[in-house]
Image: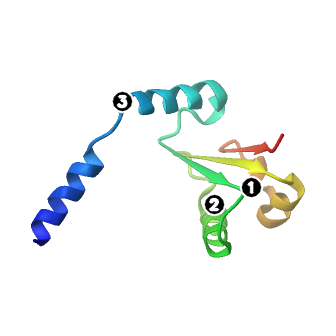
Amino acid sequence: MRTLFFLALILLVGCSNTRESYELSFFVKSQLPQISNKEVIIAIPNAGCKGCITNTENFVLNNFRNPKLGIFFFNVNSNKLLKLRLGDVLFSDNVIVQELG
């Protein structure tokens, strides 16, 4: 039973929609050119549970200098509030902030 579960999990994870992958790739290259060459891009919404947001912000604070990582904050209500929480991280070349509106 355990083997069957892992096999099913691998099959589900391995299946991907190439159209969705293409659309995501196109969006990143056209809208986020400064991080489109990164190996890993993390998209972080402004909303979420407090624990999730705190953990994500801690991850960003510890890893924003990683040259393989691109960080995209979107639907941000206030750049000032985000800057208070994250400091000068927002001015890194690896970070893009998109405000609401």
- Rendering coords of residue 77 (x, y %): 83, 53
In this view, the residue in front, 29 or 17, is 17
In this figure, what is the number of numbered marks?
3
Residue 12 position (above or below residue 16): below
Give the spatial CA distance, label 1 vs label 3.
33 Å
Residue drawn at point x = 50 percent, y = 28 percent: 23
Quadrant holding the C terminus: top right
Q: Earlier in the sequence, mark 1 or mark 3?
A: 3
Residue 50 position (above or below residue 75): below
The residue carrying pointer 3 sits among few (fewer than 14), some (14 to 19) or many (20 or more) residues within 10 Å by Cα, namely few
Q: Earlier in the sequence, mark 2 or mark 1?
A: 2
Give the spatial CA distance, label 2 vs label 3.
29 Å
Residue drawn at point x = 81 percent, y = 59 percent: 82
Frontmost of labels 2 and 3 is: 3
Q: Which residue is mark 2?
A: 60
Badge 3 element? helix
Is residue 97 rendered to the left or right of residue 81?
A: left
What label does residue 69 carry, if any?
A: none
Residue drawn at point x = 68 percent, y = 73 percent: 50
What's the residue type where badge 1 is placed? Answer: Val
Decide: marks 2, 1 in contact (CB < 8 A)?
A: yes
Q: Which residue is mark 1?
A: 89
What's the residue type where badge 3 is placed? Answer: Thr
Give the spatial CA distance, label 2 vs label 1.
8 Å
- Rendering coords of residue 83 (x, y %): 83, 58
In this view, the residue in front, 58 or 100, is 100
The residue carrying pointer 2 sits among few (fewer than 14), some (14 to 19) or many (20 or more) residues within 10 Å by Cα, namely many
What's the residue type where badge 2 is placed? Answer: Val
What label does residue 18 carry, if any?
A: 3
Quadrant holding the N terminus: bottom left
Badge 1 element? helix
Is residue 87 rendered to the left or right of residue 46?
A: right
